[in-house]
Structure formats: structure tokens, C-alpha cells
Amino acid sequence: MLDDMRVLRGAVERYRRAATAAGVPWDTDERADALGVEALCRVFDVDRIAEQAIWFHHEGLPYARVLPEGGHPLLWDNADNLLGYLSMAVGVPFPWRHQLPLLICDRIVFTFVLAGDHEGEIWRYQIEVDDRNPVRAATSLAALVSAWTDGFAAGVYARSPYDTWLHVGPDDRDPVDVLVECGLDPFAFPVHVSAYSHHDLLRARQRECGVNPDHADDFDRQEELLGAVDVALASLRA
């Protein structure tokens, strides 16, 4: 869903305060030039980009590793990269192209759905051929950020002497298990959720949010989507 902007701004501000109090630098340096809204609409084949996504990307977060596990906003400077991030969106209950990549952490991408009944939802994909696991991460941006903030009260974050990130759980624990034990939603956090070690958890969420697991795991459908991405990119270059 689309958040009321006051709710979204409040959620981001609460996270910023908690993160900076924990020692995370909130760098406010300007990021590189991004594609404009008109260009983004053409890339993602939509008529509009919601204010919530634009504000969150341009003003809500700095371009720095301020998110759990060192996640950070994606640059919106290259259509090839942006559509390429969507090549794992197999079996989702909306057109694959109608989502905007927002955040990345290692091989996990979070997107903002741009149109239809799922507009405003946050989805996540793992950039791994055999473990991509498309699934909804949160019902909205404010819900996503609020989950990260809840991690402070739950005590799930650990710090490392080697970086400034918020790490989920100690090194010797699976972060998914840590989050579940603390009553938090692991899909809202940029941690790897494997279909091999957390099959039941993943399948339950996929059923809840409308993913077709048989399609999501199908190699031929993955190849079809890769072809569709190539076609979309070719049309943008025409």
C-alpha cells in the first residue's frame, strides 16, 4: 500500500535516530545524477512513479550503508542495470516490469511496486540462479523501515570493528533464526533466506503474498523472463 507521507517520514526519522545513536554514520553527501521521473516511467512502463518512492530514494536515505547488513540505496542511473535486477521476478502476482529497484545488499534487491493492487508493496529477490526466492518483504515502505527500527529494541543488531554496519545476530548464528526467535519478520531484513534451510517459512510467505512457487522455481520461466528483459531493453534503445 502507499503510505501517508507523514507516516513514511516519521518512520524514516525514527530509524535514523536509532541508527545514528548506535553509531551508524548518516552521510548526507549528494549522490550521482539519477534518471528523471519521466525516464523512469518509460523504463518501467508505467504512467507515474509514486511520491513515496521518489522521496525515500532522493531524500529519505543517504547513499551510504546505513541499512541493516550494510544495505544501501541503488543508483537510478542505468536502465540496463535497473531492469536487470528484475530478472529474478518470476512467479510474482503483478507484471514483472512494474516495480522499481530501491535497495541492495550484497545479492539481495528490494523493489517498490509501481502500479495495480500491489502498488506500494516492497518485494525482494536474491540474485542467485537456484535460490532467487521472490517474495514480499513488507506491505509498504513505512512497514519495512519500522521493522528495521524494531530490531534495535529486540537487540538483534551486532557491531563489527571492521565496518560501520548493523549486522543481524552474531557471526555463529543464522540471522533468519535470530530474527524469527525475536518475533521479527526476516523477509523485511536484507538477510539471505534459503529455500533449502527455511523452505517452510519461505513457502508460507509466498503463498500469503500470491507468488506461484512452481513458476518461481521453473527454469524455463526464468529463461522467458530473461528474454522479456532483453526485449524491453531493446525497445528502450529503439
Image: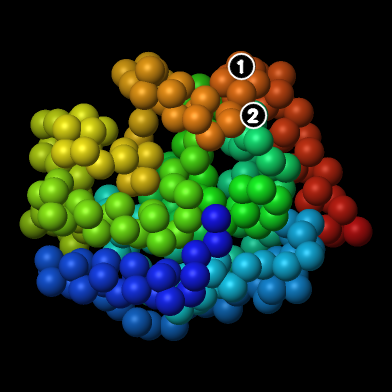
Q: How many marks?
A: 2
Q: Is residue 70 left or right of residue 220?
A: left
Residue 47 seen anywhere in this rendered image of the structure: yes
Q: Are marks 2 and 1 in contact (CB under 8 Å)?
A: yes
Q: Which residue is mark 2?
A: 91
> What label does residue 188 carry, if any?
none
Give the quarter of the figure containing the C terminus: bottom right
Q: Residue 166's x, y, as percent?
A: 20, 55
Give the quarter of the figure containing the N terminus: bottom right
> Which residue of the protein is positioned furthest toward the right in this rendering?
238
Q: Which residue corresponds to the image point at 59% horizontal and 66% vertical from the top-left?
A: 76
Sort mark 2 into few (<14), some (14-19) or many (20+) by Cα contacts within 10 Å: many
Q: Which residue is mark 1?
A: 214
- Which secondary structure lies at badge 1? helix
Q: Compared with residue 164, is residue 54 higher up or lower down, i.e. above or below?
A: below
Q: Which residue corresponds to the image point at 62% horizontal and 54% vertical from the top-left?
A: 119
Q: Residue 91's x, y, as percent?
A: 64, 29
- Which secondary structure lies at badge 2? loop
Q: Residue 6's x, y, as percent?
A: 43, 76
Q: Which residue corresponds to the image point at 69% horizontal and 74% vertical from the top-left?
A: 37
Q: Compared with residue 126, is residue 17 higher up or lower down, i.e. above or below?
A: below
> Residue 202's image quarter?
top left
